[in-house]
Image (cartoon, grey):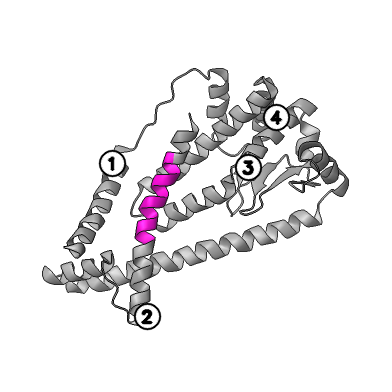
Amino acid sequence: MSKRQSSLLFFLSLVISGTIFIQMALYVISMLAGWNVKFNIVEVCHSWLKAIGLSSLEYALDALVIYTLLFSIWHIGSQFFYASRLKKHFERYKDNLLTNDMNQMHSSGKKDFIIISNPVPMAITMGFMKPKIIISTGLINLLTDDELKAVVAHEIYHKDNRDPLKIFLLSLCASTIGYIPILKWFSHQYRIIQEVLADEFAIRKQETSMNLGSALLKMLKVGKQEKMPFAYASFADTSVNYRIEYMLNPLKDVQWRIPLKKAFLSLVVFILLCAFFIYALA
C-alpha cells in the first residue's frame, strides 16, 4: 500500500462529493435569496423533470437537497459537540506529570500528548487544526517501553498527516451522500491504508516490526475499545488482524476488491449529474 493510493481515494471522494455539495448549496441560496444561479445541476434537473412530465418529482428533489444539507450541518455540529465534551473529560483525568514527561521525550516540549488516568488501554489522535495524541495509563502499564515507543510513532504519523480531519471529511461525505455508495467504500479503505502507512512509519523508525506487532497482539487480547461518536485515528480500532498479517508478510501483493455494483451505481449517478450540467451549458 502506498501514500499515492491514500491520496487518490481522498481526492476522488472530495471531487465527487464537493461537486454535489456546491451545486446543492447554490440551489438553496437561489431559493432563499431569489438568485438566478446559472449552470446549476439541480435547476437543470427541475427543467428536465418538467420537460418529461414529471414535475411532481420536483418536491422530492427539493426534499433530497434540503435533507442532505441539514444532515451535513447536524453531522458537523455533533462532531464538534462530542469532541468538545470528550476534551473536557480528558482534561479532568489528565496526568500532568506523565503528560509533561511524554511531551519532553517525544515532541521536544510541545503539547502534542495528553496522558489520562484510565485503566482501559487506549491510544488515539484527535483534533482538526492542532491534533493531540491521547494515551491512557492503562496502555502504558500494558506495554513495554519499546512497544509504547512503537505506538507513539504510529500516532505521530496520524498527527503529522492530520488524519482525524481527513477521516472526518470522508465520513461526512459517505454518510450525507449515501446515494453514491462508493464513497463509503472510499472512506473505509482510506482508514485501512492510513493505519498500514502509520505502521510502516513506526517500523521504519524502530527498524523492526516486533514491538509494533506485539503491541497489537496485546491490544487484541484486551479486546476492542468502544468506538467514540466523533472522528479520530486509533491505534487498535481498524483492521488489526489484517495489519498483523501485513506485518508478517509485507511483500505480499495487496489487491483492492472494488465493489463493482456500488462502483457502477455510483458512476451512473455521477454521469447523470454531469450530463445535466453539460445540458445546462448547452
Per the image, the residue denoted by label 1 is 261
Could you tell me if the residues under marks 4 and 3 are in contact, i.e. CB atoms within 8 Å?
no
Q: Residues within 10 Å of mark 4 (few under 14, many from 20)?
A: many
Choose between 18 and 221: the one closer to the eye: 18
* 184 left or right of 193 in image: left
Tell me the magenta residue range. 8-21
- Earlier sequence position, callout 4 versus callout 1: 4
Per the image, the residue denoted by label 2 is 32
User: Residue flagged by tag 4: what amino acid is it?
Assistant: Ala
Q: Residue 160 has which mark?
A: 3
Could you tell me if the residues under marks 2 and 4 are in contact, i.e. CB atoms within 8 Å?
no
Query: Mark 1 and mark 2: span between their CA atoms?
Result: 37 Å
Q: Is residue 11 above or below residue 211?
A: below
Say what secondary structure mark 3 lies in: helix
* Location of residue 76 in the rendering, given as x and y in whole percent from the top left corner: 53, 62
Query: Mark 2 and mark 3: span between their CA atoms?
Result: 41 Å
